[in-house]
Image: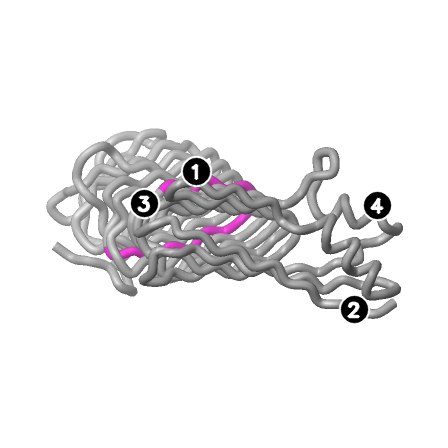
Amino acid sequence: MSTFVRTQEIEHEIGDHGQLTLRVTSPDVEMRSTDGRVARVRATFEIRAASDADADEIFDRIRFRVKEGPGSLEVSEPRDGSAGIGSLMRTFSGSDKVDASVAVEAPIGCGVHCDGVSADLTATGFQGSQHYRTVSGDLVLEDVGGELRVRGVSGDISLRASAALSTLEVNTVSGDVSAVAPHVGQLRVVTVSGDVELETSLGDGPGHRIETVSGDVSLGVGGDLTLEVRGLSTDVDVRLPHRAEGSRDRRRYVIGGGGPDILFSSMSGDIEVRTARRGVATP
């Protein structure tokens, strides 16, 4: 068996605020923002095959499907039954014969929707509406802003925002979350067993929420806050000037002069509140 490299390049103009959708199984993905109006996707396949002709045959079977529209680009894997590239490879032999990676460049303000299974995902510099979903893969978001919605299963999430986030929604199962943002207008975090580290200042308006089953939370804040805690088995460590009110199962902590309301609800997770150490806006 030899290894043959094949490349699929996709290019489509979606405009400054168009929509990019990417769905992959197995390939790792690196996404970067650009100042242009064109989205570019480059998929590289390392194919183990007996000959050039066999590699070409496999490549024809595994090329990504492309759907282009006015202001939109959708790229997804071919399907064999209910699975993607991994299932297709097993039709050629008893083991996987392809390694793949995907590199993406897209306008900084475009909408991004990315689904990955058994794939690590890195996205840098996007400032529009973004939706990321990973299963058995880590997610790293750098230099982002705008509106973020993230779902993860069995993978860690690292988020570093360079601009304010109008919305931050995170939902994870058995994965840790680390997020730093100058400001979040609307926050909702739900975890099952993962721990959460969050540093930000919070906007006024509808209440913010963090919910865990057994995960602990470390919250670094850049201003005053009113924290409500619901949980009989939850320990609370507030390392800022505050006053405490309420009963064991429903406690309230007014930090500083009070401020945006945030609810922490957990069955057995603990929470600490402290001064933010990194890149957080202060009143």
Q: Mark 1 or mark 4, which is nearer the start of the sequence?
A: 4
The picture places residue 88, in percent across and down from the top left corner, at 77, 45
| Residue depicted at x 47% and y 49% | 195
Q: Hey, what amino acid is under mark 2?
A: Thr
Could you say which disc has been placed on residue 3 in the image?
A: 2
Q: Hey, what amino acid is under mark 1?
A: Val
C-alpha gap between disc 2 and disc 3: 41 Å
Could you say which disc has been placed on residue 147 in the image?
A: 3
Q: Which residues are magenta?
A: 169-182
- Check contact, mark 4 vs mark 1: CB within 8 A: no
Q: Nearer the viewer, mark 4 or mark 3?
A: 4
| Residue depicted at x 62% and y 49% | 64
Could you say which disc has been placed on residue 190 in the image?
A: 1
The secondary structure type at the circle numbered 4 is loop
The picture places residue 72, in percent across and down from the top left corner, at 42, 43
The secondary structure type at the circle numbered 3 is strand
Which of the 4 image quadrants contains residue 252? top left
C-alpha gap between disc 4 and disc 1: 39 Å
Q: Hey, what amino acid is under mark 3?
A: Glu
Q: Mark 4 or mark 2, which is nearer the start of the sequence?
A: 2
Which quarter of the rendered picture does the N terminus lie within?
bottom right
Q: Mark 3 or mark 4, which is nearer the start of the sequence?
A: 4
Q: Mark 1 or mark 3, which is nearer the start of the sequence?
A: 3
Magenta stretch containing residue 172, yes or no? yes
Q: Nearer the viewer, mark 1 or mark 2?
A: 2
Residue 92 vs residue 134, the one in the foreground: 92
